[in-house]
Amino acid sequence: MNQDSNGKPAGSLPARLAKATIFGLGLFAAGYGIYKTGVFGDLYAMIGGQVTQAVTAPPYSRAEMYADRKAYAKDPTGAAPPRMPVGADGYYIPPAEADLPKGPYGDAVKRGRDIFTQTGVMVKANVGNAMACVNCHIDAGRREHSAPMWGAYGAYPAYRSKTGSISTLEDRIQGCFTYSMNAQDSPSGHAPEAGSDVYRDLITYMAWLADGAPAGEKLPGALYPKVPKPKDGYDLTRGKAVYEQNCALCHGDKGQGTRNAQDGVTFPPLWGPLSYNWGAGMARIDTAAGFVKANMPMGKPYSLTDQQAWDVAAYLNSHERPKDPRQTGTVAEAARDFHAGEESYYGKELNGWLLGTGVSVR
């Protein structure tokens, strides 16, 4: 028979295993209890660590919101008011395609959706490149961390430093046509006129996507994430390698995009005459890095490191594209007036070329 250190019988193997299991469970329970108090997180923060808090908002479906709306309309004093629908991840849940309304309002929503996803086809007179709204706002404007339309709808009117004035939502969309869709190279030479049905339908679509989202609040996932700039900055050689490995298959080895027979574009060009111009927000390296980090490669969000996101954003924005429409004098003057302090290659010479000079399809 086995003996312990005191010469006493040690007991059977099953008995010893049972005691060890109980002892282990006790240690686990004690450790988990301490962890739940937040002590470890506090200690980690004290030495400079950054503690990430998990989103704990309980899920609340759109079906529950609709049911609560009906109950609250019948009994506003006794029923609980409806809340914002959220998923288990804590992000707002926009309506699905199956929820598209009927009647004239639904028709306007559908027109807005079609303009959003096929801008160059639906608003051909005012689009001067191969871009569409959906290229910068994934999943038809639904995707969190892709500047979704449910976040934009309730955020305007708002002051914008880019314009130095209060912008309405229509103003903001007009800016997208001017910069992201490069309207000055379109058949009309400009964005849709103020009051156009294009804006009315797009805003109706956005309002439908935002049904249930509170206005005036900064909702989780409503913008592109801010990716910290790496301590060593960014590197174009590394960025080219990231592009070739992760982006070229869809966007082409020369950033030209890929096309189809239906609307001409499968994946948009990332530089060159048919891409967004130098005045677009995506031409800023930090903005592009946030978009790339959260949304690219397609179907693999957050698969790139922060360094890779910055490197590839710098690489694609180190190529020439249509000129900034605000430029009326020299590139140097426009760099001073409109691009000062930006993370951008605008106005800088690279490989003997002054970026910002612009390229055009005309």
Image (tube, helix red, strand yellow):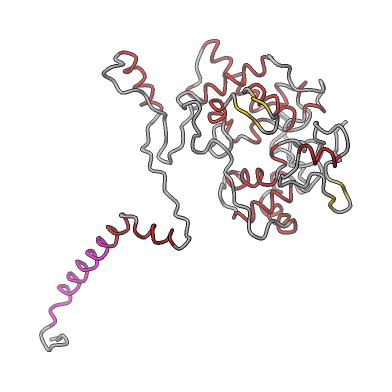
Query: Percent from the top left, x then y, of residue 343?
Result: 71, 47
Residue projecting furthest to the bottom:
7
Total tally of numbered discs in the picture: 0
Residue projecting furthest to the top:
104
Q: Quadrant of the N terminus?
A: bottom left
Instruction: Decide: is 58 above or below 318.
Output: above
Query: Percent from the top left, x then y, of residue 146?
Result: 58, 38
Residue 352, magenta (yes or no):
no
Instruction: Decide: is 283 above or below 133.
Output: below
Give whichever of 224, 333 is nearer the camera: 333
Instruction: Decide: is 357 above or below 215.
Output: below
Query: Percent from the top left, x then y, of residue 253?
Result: 76, 49
Give whichever of 167, 133 is nearer the camera: 167
Residue 29, magenta (yes or no):
yes
Is residue 161 toward the left or the right of residue 334 in the image? Answer: left
Query: Percent from the top left, x then y, of residue 254?
Result: 78, 47
Look at the magenta stretch and give its main secondary structure.
Answer: helix
Give whichever of 292, 79 is nearer the camera: 79
**Residue at position x 60%, y 53% from top?**
304
Give whichever of 13, 305 is nearer the camera: 305
**Residue at position x 85%, y 34% from top?**
360
Q: Quadrant of the C terminus?
A: top right
Give the magenta range: 10-30
